[in-house]
Image: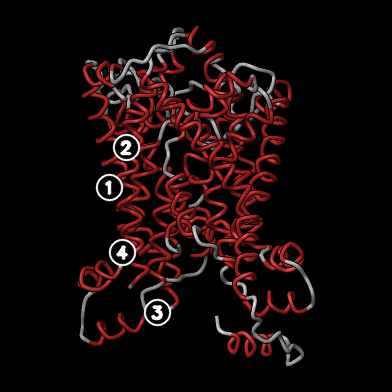
Amino acid sequence: MTTSTPRVWWKTAVGLVLTGLMLFPVYWMINVSFTRDQDMRASPPHLFPTNGTLDGYRAVLDQQLPYLGTSFLVGLGTVALTVALAAPAGYALAKLRPPGGPALSFVLLIAQMIPGIIMAMGFYAVYLTLGVLNTLPGLILADSTLAVPFAVLIFTAFMSGIPDELLQAAVVDGAGRLRTFWSVVLPVSRNSVVTVSLFAFLWSWSDFIFASTLAGGGDHQPITIGIYHYIGNNNQQWNAIMATAVVASVPAAVLLVLAQRYVSTGVTAGAVKD
Amino acid sequence: MTSTTRKSTATRGRGGAANTAPPRPGASRVRRSHRRWAWGFLAPVTLYLLAFYAYPLYRNVELSLREYTVRSFVQGGAPFAGLDNYRTVLTDPAFWPTLTHTVVFTAASLAFQFSIGMALALFFRQHFPLSGTLRALILVPWLLPLIVSASTWSWLLNSDSGLVNAALGVVGVDQVNWLTSPGWSLTSVIIANIWIGIPFNLVVLYSGLQAIPTEVYEASALDGATGWQRFWSITFPLLRPVSAITLLLGLIYTLKVFDIIWIMTRGGPTDSSATLATWSYRLGFGNLLPEFGPGAAVGNLLIVMALIAGLVYIRIQRRQNLR
């Protein structure tokens, strides 16, 4: 579609306005995080944080660091567990195609559709018996269920695209299947490893339902619970709440800046491709 | 995979250096070892699915069929109750309102997410300077942790100090108690959920639009079709498969929504924004005396709804892949 230059810039202007509207709540979160307590209930609300304060962020540093640390550890654990489980499975489903493979893919698709609240209740019952409520490994295991089915499907889709010649060449060179997987398949699938890791981290970082049911009462509470307690406890200090929210959004922002390509792939891969 | 094609592709891949083994007599043994390897790679995930999907699900069904108290939840030995929990839930005065809220929440969210997402996808399809960057930025609401979005919306919709009421006040509308009045709470959580879901619809529909060959449009432009005609006669029909998948995935996601509602309103006031998901959570975890049985029963009703949507989704996708 070729149009004259002024027309195109007019579209960019509309695009900017639409994006601005969509992102306005995000701007508002940032604005409120810098607003002083006495301006919080000003009428009309201040649209810009003139006379801004860093009190909210000071409160984050004082009170929320342990929560952030927990979330970070849980995120890393979830990524490691997810990739370790899903990458070999993706390789087998894409390249070794055993009988029963399609059935397993089907189960994985279904597994993604189970509402989190049901998983949480089942996990709670199991964890209570095992005594792993309020532990890091318990939360990591539960959070990984958010990512593993998606990850296997993504790995299968990506690895189906690896040329068979490449794998056969490895076999010819005398590599066994483990070796082929480790030194040929995995390096070639770097992009899918990145995509899966990003989403696994983000989902575990954002998880609220497992955190509140399985780790809501112990020493290892993630940042989502930190914010939730904040809302419950000090209803007045919204700059601190929003500052925590801003900090909690950092991984999403980093992800979008560093890996925008992978994000779009991840969103569509589950839906459009098989 | 015949040996000739294998050899020829291998040759192409290795620049003629490879001359692979001729067909061996022990082919079935090879195939069996191949299968063993494949399941070796699949074993971790299979065990994982059994332990962390199948078993919690089984526990959930069991919870819903027994009469659990806090003591028997810990020590075991709860008496079998048959379908009593389901009967309790279905005859609860909260059941029909909650089901209605779930349906309204899901239908309204889907309708607006989809139509706004579609409009944005059509707009961003016309490439213009910055279109890629802006499209990426619009993803932000979808990537934010739900607790962040939900608390931001809580403050935007705050009765006394929220920006929304301030803006409405400028136009002369009286203060609306978005989150604290039974008449508005469901609308409020729907608005927040629409905002969160638009990016997903945009991205999937946009990729669907990309797949429509431009020649189709060029031909219709030659025939003198207007933009609106082009949308209804070309884009919409060709996009129907992708639209169906987007809507069904949206349906599955929306049925599951719990965080946003719980954080913004806790399903209240007086259950006016409660859905099956929040009800199940409140029964199981929200009260001092947990009612695990009825909670699990509500959860299982939810799972049935999600699975029906899921099976329809898989059916449609299979049919498209065959085509």
Q: Which residue is mark 2?
A: B304
Residue drawn at the location 58% of the way across and 62% of the way down: A261
Cα–Cα gap, marks 4 and 3? 30 Å
Residue drawn at the location 21% of the way across and 24% of the way down: B96
Q: Which callout, 1 or 2, points to the residue nearer the camera?
A: 2
Q: Is disc 1 surrounded by few (<14), some (14 to 19) or many (20+) residues within 10 Å?
A: few
Quadrant of the rendered image containing residue A52: top right
Cα–Cα gap, marks 3 and 1? 32 Å
In percent of width and height, residue B76 lies at 50, 13
Query: What's under tag 2, amino acid-wise?
Result: Val
Cα–Cα gap, marks 4 and 1? 17 Å
In percent of width and height, residue A112 lies at 46, 45
Q: Are marks 1 and 2 in contact (CB under 8 Å)?
A: no
Q: Which residue is mark 4?
A: B241
Tag 2 secondary structure: helix
Q: Which mark is residue B28?
A: none
Q: Which residue is mark 1?
A: B111
Q: Which callout, 3 or 1, points to the residue nearer the camera?
A: 1
Q: Which residue is mark 3?
A: A3
Residue drawn at the location 41% of the way across and 81% of the way down: A2
Residue B231, above or below A20: below
In percent of width and height, residue A100 lies at 49, 57
Residue A44, above or below A250: above
Q: Is residue A51 visible?
A: no
Q: Is disc 4 surrounded by few (<14), some (14 to 19) or many (20+) residues within 10 Å?
A: some
Tag 4 secondary structure: helix
In this view of the protein, which residue sits in the foreground, B42 or A253? B42
Q: Which callout, 4 or 3, points to the residue nearer the camera?
A: 4
